[in-house]
Image (spheres, grey):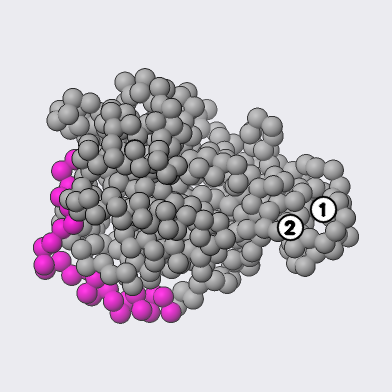
Amino acid sequence: MTAPVAPGPADLVISGCTALVHDAAGQVGFAEDAAIVVRDGAVAEVTTAAAARDLAAAERLDARGQAALPGLINCHTHAPMVALRGIAEDVPVEEWFNDHVWPIESNLAARDVELGARLACAELIRGGVTTFADHYFAMDTVADVVAETGLRALLGQAYFSSQGPAGRAASLDFALRRAGDADGRVTTCLAPHAPYTVDDADLAATAELAREHGLPVHLHAAESRAQTERSLARHGVTPIGVLRRAGLLDVDVLIAHGTGILESDAAALRAATGRVAVASAPRGYLKFAWDTTPVRLLADLGIPVGLATDGAASNNSLDVWESMALTALVQKSATGDPRWLTSRQALHHATLQSARAVGLGERIGSLAPGRRADIVLVDLTGPHTQPVHDLAATLVHSARSGDVRTTIVDGRVLMRDRELLTVDVPAVTRELTERLPALVARGHGRRIQEYDA
């Protein structure tokens, strides 16, 4: 916590909260009866409520009884897929893709993507998510929705090799055109779908484009152990080996899922010269009966693991709060060690590690001077969060996304006392419902791709 604040009016002062803060080593701690001072969209000071009591401010929020956290980050999702929530349940992943999702996705129009993205942004804001990483189609519409709703996002236009050279060109064109949009809240990336849908030549070309233009890459890889085994049988290397061979470990790359990463992949990951990160969405893995992301192995390699939900078509929700709790619980089960992950480690994954995973580790992820003012206020007064003996455990294992009262991005309040201020949910759901019969039709039998990983 800093010294008393300097004089001068603030844009926003949040006072009386318990603030989640990080020490010089990045470890999570808590500051009681704190005040957060916001100027020009950034955190100016984290001080005491007493020190900020008489500070002039355009807006003040009384946050007594609430915890202030850095906004949560969904490190891998497909926001428009909320339109397909519950469309394919209790089936293997091959059937999920080939018989349900990919035939339906061939019906998608830009308006469907826009409506799905709007609904998703409302869900994210209500759940305390201030940044998301998305990898989908018609991404110009998603970038427009991000600008209008006030969120922050890392966006990429997905492509398959089956689209020919035009797919990769469109991904690059989007990344170059939309970088820095929404007053800098939109960052962009190249987005090849996966090693099993994008061939080696396209992956290598993507790595070259990433180097040439200074762009990160966001793709699915080693999603499951079965994918890894098939890759070994067909190509003689794991999916991580495919990325290494293509040069994608020598640029900044965000790998979605990675549950099929093996200990034998450690050497390739250790030798990577790019910034490698992994996004983990544990709820979806439980639904598909997959293994979980090897978080401990990745931690030993110094690779940040960010929290994610994947798309709501597979995960049914965009609740990063749930991902945080499941990460802590599933890792205990997977390692047989109740000491891993701790609640504080889970909070670290949800904040600084997730920020680093999406390439924004110097801008967001902590409540510290100079960081963007992406802040959520969490009500701790409910019966399910009282009494508080260990605040970290309360936040991870007792609190829920519905306890988020206020969501702020760049110092702008997007939700106040559970009231959404930037999305008209009834209007979105009304139009989306009208469009659903045409969207979910599967009689045509078309698929945008064949899943045979």
| Identity, as a three-letter code, of the amino acid under mark 2 | Arg
| Front disc: 2 or 1 | 2
Residue 129: image location, x then y, percent: 52, 55
The residue lying toward the viewer, choosing from 203 and 77, is 203
Q: Which residue is mark 2?
A: 39
Residue 156: image location, x then y, percent: 38, 52
Asked if one can make out residue 427 in the rendered structure from this viewpoint, the answer is yes
Residue 317: image location, x then y, percent: 40, 57
Residue at 46% across, 33% down:
275
Looking at the rendering, which quadrant does residue 427 occupy? bottom left
Residue at 44% across, 62% down:
143
Pointer 2: residues within 10 angstroms few (<14), some, or many (20+)? many
Residue 181: image location, x then y, percent: 51, 60
Q: Which secondary structure, mark 2?
A: strand
120 left or right of 61? left
- Rendered image: mark on residue 365: none
Q: Which residue is mark 1?
A: 49
Looking at the rendering, which quadrant does residue 288 occupy? top left
Query: What is the C-alpha distance between the residues marked 2 and 1?
Result: 17 Å
Range shown magenta: 427-453
Q: Is residue 300 above or below residue 442?
A: above
